[in-house]
Amino acid sequence: MGAQTNAAPIIIKKKRVSGGDGHHGGAWKVAYADFVTAMMAFFMLMWLLNATTEKQRKGLADYFSPTIPVNPVSGGGDGAFGGNNMFSEKTMVMDGSGASARHPSPAKQARGSTGVEPNGGSTGTTQDFSTLEAQLLGRTGESMVSDKVLKHIVTRVTDEGLVVELFDTEDQPLFESGTDKPTAVMRALTLLVARSSDLVKNQIAVEGHVSASPVVLARNPAWDLSTARAQVVRQMLEDKGVLDQRLDRVTGNADRELSDGNPMAPRNNRIEVIFLRNR
């Protein structure tokens, strides 16, 4: 008989370690998250469509209408615009102006916090005038024009309404000398007033004033010139979107109402745009 041994047989077990069979890198999680986000956006869109009226949806669409008119005289350099571009979309974004005012739908246009009222705007109280003043004087940080242009504007609230004075300076007139042809600065100011006028719905008056002539003339042109300049501003306001029904009167005052003690001072050459108090 052969020799017997008590040594137990050696058994080798090979254990397979799983490397995360249930994960496979996690790329599927990103795809799933995108799918869930898209579904949430879809259901929110469906809810909004059901929660708004047709007029409100048209108003929203008009607000985002891609219209950006650019003044061709703006751009670089140290001229009247100071190198700034005049984009209407940078103006009164929170109040619903911009492209919607230029291309309104049958439901009118978006009016910001005032909704889609048929007439739009506000009631013309002193508080409303304060908002309009801030917009005209560039205090909102959203002005279309540079400080070189804003120095031609002063405002005051009177019993008649909000008076916006646009006036000549020593180095920059608003009209070419002795004519009713507006300069680039006057066009920029008129555009600013027209865009800002959407903040209220008051009637508007335009008055022209000129300085006195240094010589006595047989036929004083001051009356005709002041009236002609006021008419030009009225037409420019209408061209920039102000409804003609809002323009209550257009007058020329010649050199009868001076702003400066010197009758021949450039400061007396001015246009007054008055937002009249509601009757």
Image (spheres, helix red, strand yellow):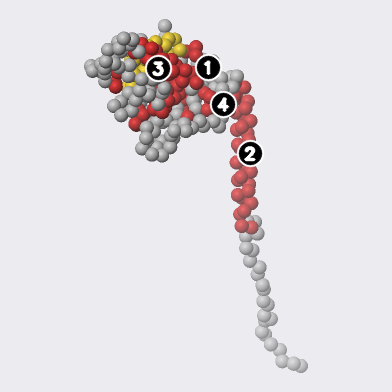
User: Mark 1 or mark 3, which is nearer to you?
Assistant: 3
Q: Where in the figure is residue 276, as x and y percent of width and height?
A: 40, 11
Which residue lies under the disc numbered 4?
Answer: 62
Which residue is drawn at the image coordinates 69% and 81% (left, top)?
9
Which residue is drawn at the image coordinates 63% and 43% (left, top)?
35
The answer to whether 206 is drawn above or below residue 42 in the figure is above
Q: Is there CB contact under 8 Å for labels 4 and 3?
A: no
The quarter of the displayed image where residue 230 is located: top left
User: Mark 4 or mark 3, which is nearer to you?
Assistant: 3
Which residue lies under the disc numbered 1?
Answer: 117
User: Mark 1 or mark 2, which is nearer to you?
Assistant: 1
Between the C-alphas of marks 1 and 3, the distance is 34 Å
Q: In the image as oriented, which residue stretches furthest toward the left?
A: 261
| Residue 194 seen in render | yes
User: Mark 2 or mark 4, which is nearer to you?
Assistant: 4
The three-letter code of the residue at mark 2 reads Met
Counting residues from the N terminus, which is met first, the one under dot 4 or under dot 1? 4
Label 4 environment density (alpha carbons within 10 Å; few <14, some 14–19, many ≥20): many
Q: Is there CB contact under 8 Å for labels 4 and 1?
A: no
Residue situated in front as seen by the camera: 242 or 98 = 242
Residue 229 numbered tag = 3
The quarter of the displayed image where residue 131 is located: top left
Counting residues from the N terminus, which is met first, the one under dot 2 or under dot 4? 2
Residue situated in front as seen by the camera: 209 or 102 = 209
Q: Is there CB contact under 8 Å for labels 1 and 2?
A: no
Label 1 environment density (alpha carbons within 10 Å; few <14, some 14–19, many ≥20): few
Which residue is drawn at the image coordinates 26% and 15% (left, top)?
215
Q: How many marks?
A: 4
- The secondary element bearing badge 2 is classed as helix
Label 2 environment density (alpha carbons within 10 Å; few <14, some 14–19, many ≥20): few
Q: Where in the figure is residue 1, as x and y percent of width and height?
A: 76, 93
